[in-house]
Image (spheres, helix red, strand yellow):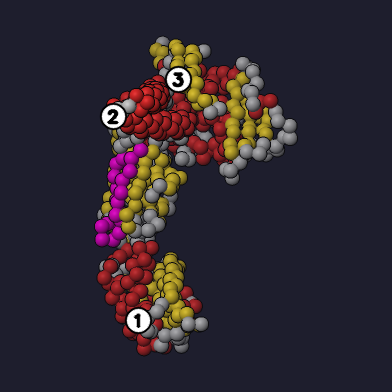
Amino acid sequence: MITTTVRFLAVFLILIQPLSAQAPRPPWVDQRLKDNDFYHGIGKASLKNQNAQDQARINALKSISLSISTEISVLSKRNVMEVDDVSNTVYANEVVVSSVASIGDLELVGDYEDKKFHYVYYKYSKAKHRSNIDQAKQRAKSVYKEFLSYDDVDVYNKVSSLVKCYELIQFTYGESVNYTDSKVTFDLWTKVPGDLQNIIRQIRIVNDSQELRGVYGYQIEEPLRAGLQFILPPPYNLVPGGDLMVEFYFTAGAGDFSFSSVKADNGGFAETYISKVQSPRPTQLVKARVDLKAYKNDQRPSAFLDKKLNKIADYSQTSFNIEISKQQNDQIAIYVKSSQGIDNITVKRLNNYFEAEFLKISDYEIKDRNTAEKILEETGQNSADVCDSEECRILIGKTLQVDKFILVDVVALSSNNRKTIQCQMRITNITEKTTEQMRLYDDIYRESSAEEAVRKRISKWVQDFYNVLNPGVVNFMINPSFTGDIAFYIDGQYTGQSLPIYEYELDSHGKHTFSFEASGYESKKISYNINPQTGLVREENINLKKKSRFKAFLRSSIFPGMGQIYSADASNLGRRRMGRIFQSMGLVAFAGTAISWYGYDEAHKVYDSAYTNYLNSNQLNQINDSRDDAQDKHQKMTNIQSIAIGVSTITGAIWLFSALEAAISFPDYYATTNREGLDFKFVYNDGEIIPSVGYRTTF
């Protein structure tokens, strides 16, 4: 999944000078160079990826960021993170990566490309890193001093200074930034967001718009108007909130704004328009808040800082409820023609069938075809012109005073005893003067006439065309406290997006299965049947359960490898490989156990038969021969039994070892601290499962 941070990194790294592959294989590809004065980052990406070079650069930067992150104290991280349930990897990606990329003091060591992978090696001076932190602290203190110099009424400059100060302290990675004022010392990490919250709480934002109504696909004529006031202590009291930037954004529904961020005028009013409603949802919600992101020095997206600023801005906001009428209520005209193979009298009958099918599945108001033909006659045109000229279709639509004009061209062809019926359907938006959709249907028919063939297929064509015009929409939200990325899948295919998902249009109606996956959480699947009858809009809050060490143990107890596969995800692909190995071992051992005990059972039957022959023998020679034969069969049976017991023991050991390994090597998804002490787990290395023992500490 591509987060805002990763997209920002991609753009940043692309701007770095192009790298050329080096013929000799550099030593750092196989063994990292030792230099304790630098952070080292080696990125690797498969050449199957079209953007392998850029991805390798991003991976190298992530490696450096993770190294920096492991050296940051737990206390410092708590200054930065809002919740404790965050892994070290998430911390590095959201905070450290974006800040290191912004500083831009990376040194390129080299890059290399072999037959399978592209490699990039960057390093970052620890001395420079320390210097950058110290400089950020000094600049943050200077900006905070500037903030203190402004009067209470100068809210604009106070907000601007605090946001810029908050932006600067991000580059200290949570280290205390102590500031002394009037002999009182405090940490800017807690003081700045607190001051910013206090100011936002003193801003009153109200909805100053009339009742808002609109139509899906069109502009809303009435503006969204927010009024701002500062609630200040005497002698100021209430003051208009002029000059502040106000952000408008959808929380339910979707649409385009003329401007999503607007500066309030001297009277404290900020207004914008919805230039186009992009969602058919009947009730939609837009919110307005102070746009704190607009006051950053660096306007590039920052996943972590932007999220923090938005949360503070939410302390004062207003909402706009908008009622939207759906596309199905449009007035339309349907005009059926035939470019070839069907006479005009038949075409008029088919026109009635098409109109009847559209009325069955929609709330369209359909205008009469005869009126359209009169317009064609008055303008000196024929039915062929309607197909070839969008201008003519728009003219007819305007004259009929309809919103949409649907043209259907039915063609019947016959050659070499092969009869084909074709139907082209297109819809023209009269207001916007554009053709929105065109679909072509082509089928071989065996009916006695083209009219019969068309009539049998009209229902299917109209249903499919209407589905295209009215796609199913899904909305999936997550708990605000969830800090990871939940990948979004439809029918087993990754969409490239992560939750929250707003107004996601589906390619087809019918039953769809939606899957959700996140590192350290059990995946979840939901199935919906989405169509005009069951409802076109679906929405749900998604809650994922954390994976647990006990469940991994329990699953591998049921069958080897299941616990390892259960704990695998995109960040722990080795667990899946480990699970496959245990599964293979379990299957082989189980099959060997079954075969050996089956062999023992067969040998036991042979021995029983030989022993029965011995008991039934009467003559001395017969007794001796049957006894020897019984002893021989007994020995073979005993040997096979020993093998079966041995194989069963191995099978049991594999079962137990798989369960223990699943628990011992369960990934530490949620680690927020750098644990110190012995670290024991099993790892997969060159086809072998080997124990790994290490000591973890923080320097």
State yes or no: residue 35 in magenta.
no
User: How packed is label 2: few (under 14 Cα within 10 Å), some, or many (20 or more)?
Assistant: few
**Of 497 and 631, the residue lying toward us:** 631
> What is the magenta segment's predominant secondary structure?
strand
Which residue is found at the position 49% from the left and 77% from the top? 389
User: How packed is label 3: few (under 14 Cα within 10 Å), some, or many (20 or more)?
Assistant: some
User: How packed is label 1: few (under 14 Cα within 10 Å), some, or many (20 or more)?
Assistant: few
Q: Which mark is residue 373?
A: none
Which residue is found at the position 38% from the left and 55% from the top? 506
Q: Which residues are magenta?
A: 523-542
Residue type beneath disc 1: Glu
Secondary element at image label 2: helix
Look at the picture and state if 469 lies above or below 155. Answer: below
Earlier along the polypeptide chain: callout 1 or callout 3?
Answer: 1
Image check: 132 left or right of 21?
Answer: left
State yes or no: residue 534 in magenta.
yes
Nearer the observer, disc 2 or disc 3? 2
Look at the picture and state if 451 lies above or below 153. Answer: below
Q: Which mark is residue 616?
A: 2
Q: Which mark is residue 681?
A: 3
Distance from label 1 to label 2 (Cα)? Answer: 86 Å
Q: Which residue in the structure is indicated by mark 1?
A: 452
Look at the picture and state if 248 lies above or below 577. Answer: below
Dividing the picture into quadrants, the one containing residue 562 is top left
Residue type beneath disc 2: Asn
Quick check: can you spot residue 310? Answer: yes
Quick check: can you spot residue 105? Answer: no
Earlier along the polypeptide chain: callout 2 or callout 3?
Answer: 2
**Of 418 and 478, the residue lying toward us:** 418
Distance from label 2 to label 3 (Cα)? Answer: 62 Å
Nearer the observer, disc 1 or disc 3? 3
